[in-house]
Image (cartoon, rainbow, N blue to C red):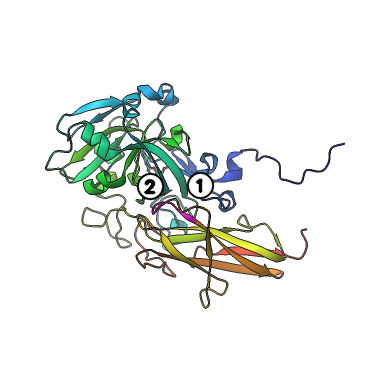
Amino acid sequence: ASATPSVRPMPTGKLADWFILHNDRPWALETRRAAYGIAPITPQSAFFVRNNLPTPPESIIANRDGWRFEVSGVARPGSLTLAELKALPTRVVASVLQCSGNGRAFFPHRPSGSPWSLGAAGCALWTGVRVADVLEHFGGALEEAQYLTATGAEDLPEGVDADQVVVERSIPLDKGMDDCLLAWEMNGEPLPLVHGGPLRLIVPGYYGVNNVKWVRRLAPTAAESGAKIQVSGYRVREVGESGGPQHPSMWRMNVKSWLNGPGGDGGPVVAGKAMLYGVAFSGERGVSRVEVSADEGQTWREADFVGPDLGPNAWRSFVLPVELAAGEYRFVSRATDRQGDTQPADATPNHRGYGHNGWRDAALTVNVVNTLP
Ligand code: MSS
């Protein structure tokens, strides 16, 4: 007879083990808190998914290297296949990808859209070529260009104005030239179709929506895209106000942190010594400090960063050793970034529930017992 295994069996990989399903048409899959673990890199198998339109067919990854994208707004407009792109110098960047609506569920005014709590975010290693090198390959951006505009390759429904539905986003051209990548690998493996394979834009430190998947066109442009997703969507406006270009676009991600465990899935934790753990990040800045409170922010203890610092756009894991007696605890964490911004207790409500970073709502409830039931 075989001995009782001392470690947990391999996860079954069932969708529900890793995700909260908000929608399957188009996909909206939220990573469960307990699925993050302590490592700073989120595995593909547990990485959240958010699509605005149905996913393109599998056939677009049948011949990845044959994928062709256009480049305009440059001295010599043209196109490249993925195979040709791979011949340019390659980089790996660690960056958090987080949906603009992550934390929407916490806003009391119940904004429309998927009610994400904390799991519409992940941190991955992205392999690709710098946008700056791609534009250089085509003779450089035209002088009037101010923005970098990327277009997704989804089939658009018939009979609708393309601008109403196309996923096309613009970011400042300086940002695009600075550190953006056209990426074909995620955590060292071919980019899965749901995450934008064969090729997606990575905008380190910017909200998810800017990281256009299935890129079929990249262009320095004089103006921002006229697509609805750019003009009125993904902008911060007051509750009840209608959106327009006068409102700030969801670009750089603000400072944020949360605890993932122990007991992240609500399961009981045995009394005694325990290690609280979580993640903290701030777009383009990195974090300098994380504190944890067990009394709703009256007193704080500083946590320790653990594991590698993968750069200013990655998240950092933090831990705090604690001694827990039986009972129920509510722990919160509060991060400060390298420019001195600290998370507020409560996020400012805005119409669509974007950019939530209040520490109070992100509390981890830990149920400590003397012996496991
Ligand atoms: N792209 C495309 N093409 N399409 C879509 O829909 N979405 C957005 C991005 N990109 C899209 C795209 C979003 S919105 C998000 S978040 C992201 O993506 C996600 O990713 P994944 O990979 O995770 O799925 Mo909100 O901000």
Image spot of residue 371 (x, y percent):
78, 62
Q: Residue at point 63% right, 59% down?
A: 262
Q: Secondary structure at mark 1?
A: loop
Q: Is residue 235 above or below residue 181?
A: below
Asked whether residue 108 is in view, the answer is no
Q: Quadrant of residue 275?
A: bottom right
Write down the residue under mark 2.
Answer: 208
Q: Up-down: is 4 above or below 86?
A: below
Q: Is residue 180 above or below residue 197?
A: below
Q: Residue at x 25, y 40 (%)?
A: 132
Q: Is label 2 in a helix, a strand or a loop?
A: helix
Tell me what residue is drawn at x 83 percent, y 41 percent: 3
Asked whether, in this view, residue 176 is left or right of residue 15, the answer is left
Query: Which residue lies most toward the right here?
Result: 1
Q: Which of the two labelled residues, at mark 1 and mark 2, occupies the earlier sequence position?
A: 1
Residue 307 makes an appearance in the image: yes
Q: Is the residue at mark 2 in contact range of ligand 1, meaning its CB lies under 8 Å from it?
A: yes
Specify start and end residues of the magenta stretch as a single range.
Answer: 311-316
What residue would you read off at disc 1?
41
Rendered location of residue 13, percent (x, y): 61, 38
Looking at the image, the residue that sits furthest to the bottom is 298
The reply to whether callout 1 and callout 2 are in contact (CB within 8 Å) is no
Q: Which mark is residue 177?
A: none
In the rendered image, residue 267 lying in the magenta stretch gets the answer no
Q: How crowded is the residue under tag 2: few (<14 C-alpha within 10 Å), some, or many (20+)?
A: many
- Three-letter amino acid code at disc 1? Ile
